[in-house]
């Protein structure tokens, strides 16, 4: 064997061992730096995809445009009239809301963010969003929409973050089922036959009386997700030898969601 | 040769970025489209052994940085392990190098298809690693499609990649096994 081949093999082995022994923190920083480096491409790609979607949508409705325009004009007139009435009421409602402390009830500070890309890795489900450390995003922050839980932040760069989706098998969230005392751990499935995967709740009691359609809410344990966020709805329930397992339809359409909120703290 | 090697690194990096925008193929149960293995296998066939090792290191490490979310602690898939998953099929392909250096288009085509057949090995190794760490090994038709599907797609992609890379290497003055272009 040539000496250069032996040297190359030795160097290769040393580098592989070094990479495998790198602390997890360093690997996360490396991933953050990598995504930061390609963030201009991701942003451009996301806006191009959005524009292409808009053009496609526009072309689809072209033949119906005239009819739709007439309908919208009529609707517009009606809404203008309603709006002027509601504007007067708005000030009063706001004042009453403040008085009743409704604003204080929404205990979280939400940072709006846009999804830049959805990774189509074979075994993992995650996406990148256009907010990073400069916006106050940190690791293990919850990402939600008005419909429910999306995932949690795993890696953060300066103006971009990686979000592990709730459909990933490695993200486990403690949940409770509405109107019951049942609690369990929800996680994604490793591979699902549909684009929007089912979630699974494990460690439920075997005698749990769960019906399809019941809401699954975060239990607030673990320090990432506050309690009361919607994760999804029960699809079916089966009792195994030691535990009950329920499959859950996610509340958020993870394949289509574009705008999300990062919970950056409490008010 | 070095120029071609660096061009290959750039192409592999670009392909990783490009793959981020490609949706999974629903017809194949969510199998993904992979360009990187075809580029990597071409490098394994054309480059000498030390550079092939460097290419393996770059591709495997980048694969994990792009595709594996980094959890805070106890990761169930150690970042960098894909270097070893790429190494095994890479070494098999490197063994075909004498055949590749004959520079016949039909052998290049055959080698591209062999590379495509080896592509699922990388995904199978990743799946085996994940299953081992999560202590839950099972196979379903979806998982089989997720492993085999990218290989089937590569059967179409790999020959095209090979036929693009060969003239590119010539343009960059790299003609392995042939006298240098004047």
Image (tube, rainbow, N blue to C red):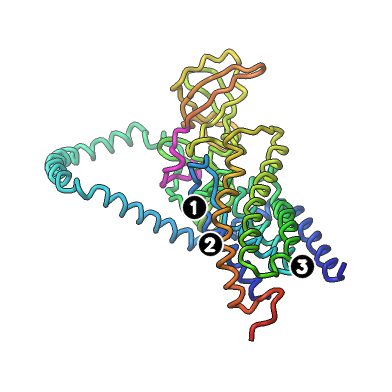
Which residue matches tag 3? B50
Image point (65%, 56%), residue name: B115
Q: Picture coordinates of residue A7 (x, y %)?
A: 84, 68
Badge 1: few (under 14), some or many (20 or more) residues near its Cα, within 10 Å? some
Residue at far bottom of view:
B182
B39 relative to A94, above or below: below
Distance from Cα at disc 1 to Cα at disc 2: 16 Å
Q: Picture coordinates of residue B68 (x, y %)?
A: 62, 49
Q: Confirm whether the magenta stretch covers residue B80.
A: no
Distance from Cα at disc 2 to Cα at disc 3: 28 Å
Image point (48%, 58%), residue name: A42
Element type where label 2 sits in the image: loop
Image point (27%, 48%), residue name: A60
Q: Return the mark for residue B22.
A: 1
Between tags 1 and 2, which lies in front? 1
Residue extent of the magenta highlight:
A250-267
Q: Are marks 1 and 2 on the same chain?
A: no
Which residue matches tag 2? A38
Q: Quadrant of residue B12?
A: bottom right
Q: Quadrant of residue A157?
A: bottom right
Q: Is residue B94 visible?
A: yes
**Considering only order in the chain, which callout, 3 or 1, is on the residue closer to the N terminus?**
1
Q: Are marks 1 and 2 in contact (CB under 8 Å)?
A: no
User: Subunit of mark 3?
Assistant: B
Badge 2: few (under 14), some or many (20 or more) residues near its Cα, within 10 Å? few
């Amino acid at each position: 064997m040539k000496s250069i081949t032996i040297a190359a093999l030795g160097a290769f082995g040393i580098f592989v061992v070094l990479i495998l022994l790198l602390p997890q923190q360093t690997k996360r920083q490396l991933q953050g730096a990598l995504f930061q480096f390609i963030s201009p491409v991701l942003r451009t790609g996301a806006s191009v995809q959005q524009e292409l979607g808009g053009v496609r949508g526009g072309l689809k409705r072209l033949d119906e445009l005239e009819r739709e325009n007439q309908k919208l004009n009529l609707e517009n007139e009606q809404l203008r009239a309603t709006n002027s009435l509601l504007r007067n009421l708005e000030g009063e409602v706001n004042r009453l809301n403040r008085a009743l402390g409704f604003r204080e009830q929404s205990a979280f500070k939400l940072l709006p963010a846009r999804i830049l890309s959805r990774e189509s890795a074979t075994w993992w489900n995650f996406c990148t969003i256009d907010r990073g450390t400069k916006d106050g995003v940190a690791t293990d922050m919850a990402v939600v929409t008005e419909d429910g839980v999306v995932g949690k932040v795993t890696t953060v760069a300066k103006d971009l973050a990686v979000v592990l989706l709730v459909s990933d098998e490695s993200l486990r969230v403690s949940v409770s089922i509405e109107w019951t005392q049942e609690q369990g751990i929800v996680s994604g499935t490793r591979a699902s036959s549909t684009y929007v995967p089912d979630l699974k709740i494990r460690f439920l009691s075997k005698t749990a009386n769960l019906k399809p359609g019941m809401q699954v809410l975060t239990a607030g344990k673990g320090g990432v997700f506050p309690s009361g966020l919607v994760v999804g709805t029960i699809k079916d329930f089966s009792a195994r030898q030691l535990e009950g397992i329920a499959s859950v339809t996610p509340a958020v359409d993870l394949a289509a969601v574009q705008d999300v909120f990062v919970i950056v703290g409490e008010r | 040769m070095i120029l071609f090697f660096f061009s290959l690194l750039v192409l592999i990096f670009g392909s990783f970025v490009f793959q981020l925008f490609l949706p999974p193929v629903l017809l194949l149960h969510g199998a993904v489209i992979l360009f990187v293995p075809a580029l990597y296998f071409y490098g394994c066939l054309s480059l000498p052994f030390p550079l092939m090792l460097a290419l393996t290191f770059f591709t495997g490490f980048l694969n994990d940085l792009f595709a594996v979310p980094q959890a805070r602690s106890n990761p169930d898939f150690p970042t960098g392990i894909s270097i070893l998953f790429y190494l095994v099929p890479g070494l098999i392909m490197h063994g075909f190098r004498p055949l590749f250096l004959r520079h016949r288009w039909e052998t290049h085509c055959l080698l591209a298809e062999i590379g495509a057949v080896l592509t699922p090995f990388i995904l199978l190794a990743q799946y085996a690693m994940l299953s081992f760490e999560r202590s839950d090994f099972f196979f379903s038709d979806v998982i089989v499609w997720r492993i085999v599907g990218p290989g089937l797609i590569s059967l179409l992609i790999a020959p095209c990649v090979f036929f693009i890379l060969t003239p590119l290497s010539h343009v960059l003055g790299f003609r392995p096994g042939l006298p240098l272009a004047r």
